[in-house]
Amino acid sequence: MGLEYRSDDYHASLTLFTQDTDNLIRYAGVYPTGINQNVDSAESKGAELAFGLSRDEFQLDAALSRVKATETKDGITLERIRVPKWSGHLLASYYLTSGRVWAQALYRGERRDVNFSTSEDVRLKGYWLINLGASHELADNLTLSGRIENLADKQYEEIYSYGTRGRTGMLTLDWRF
């Protein structure tokens, strides 16, 4: 369920949501002898507030989400793994005659995970990532784009004990035909 407002240069929305899942499957136990197991039920409830603003060549978009996610097995209810209570993003873009430059901030809050070596619960820290990018249209069907992700070379985890990329640069040439 949601509400949305739009004008020529501004938009805002509030979305409330709920999701119920029966028979969710997830890994349980200690690696490598653990097994995939049925979680009796899982539930996610939350809200997202989003807004955007456009002024001439400048555009700003942002969203903030709050989620309460639980799973129930054998009558015991726990916080869902890897689902942060808070997350959000901010994206600022400036449009040029034949391209665009942009900056983005992404946030994921603290969340529960499982250490698959010991089967114990762990907490993953929240993190911010900053990304930058630009694109330039070389011809009607040819665009050169570049971006730098994780500009600050932040150390973070999306899944417990799995590495994530540090600062990463990408350059692409898109040909549309």
Image (spheres, rainbow, N blue to C red):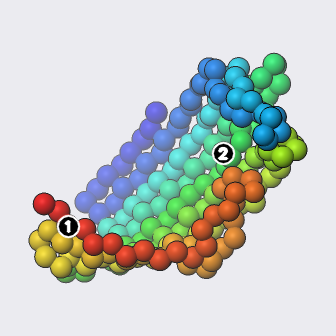
Structural crowding at the residue carrying mark 1, measured as other residues with C-alpha within 10 Å and reported as few (<14), some (14–19) or many (≥20): few
Figure check: 30 above or below 100: above
Residue 158, picture quadrant: bottom right
**85 sits left or right of 112 in the view:** left
Which quadrant holds the C terminus?
A: bottom left
Figure check: 87 above or below 4: below
The kind of residue tagged 2 is Val
Question: Which residue is located at x 34 percent, y 60 percent?
Answer: 10
Residue under pointer 2: 83
Q: Is residue 47 visible?
A: yes
The kind of residue tagged 1 is Trp
Q: Nearer the viewer, mark 2 or mark 1?
A: 1
Dot 2: element: loop
Residue under pointer 1: 175
Dot 1: element: strand
**Mark number for residue 158?**
none
Mark 2 or mark 1: which comes first in sequence? 2
Question: Which residue is located at x 42 percent, y 41 percent?
Answer: 3
Where residue 175 sits in the image (x, y, percent)?
Answer: 20, 67
Structural crowding at the residue carrying mark 2, measured as other residues with C-alpha within 10 Å and reported as few (<14), some (14–19) or many (≥20): many
Figure check: 172 above or below 65: below
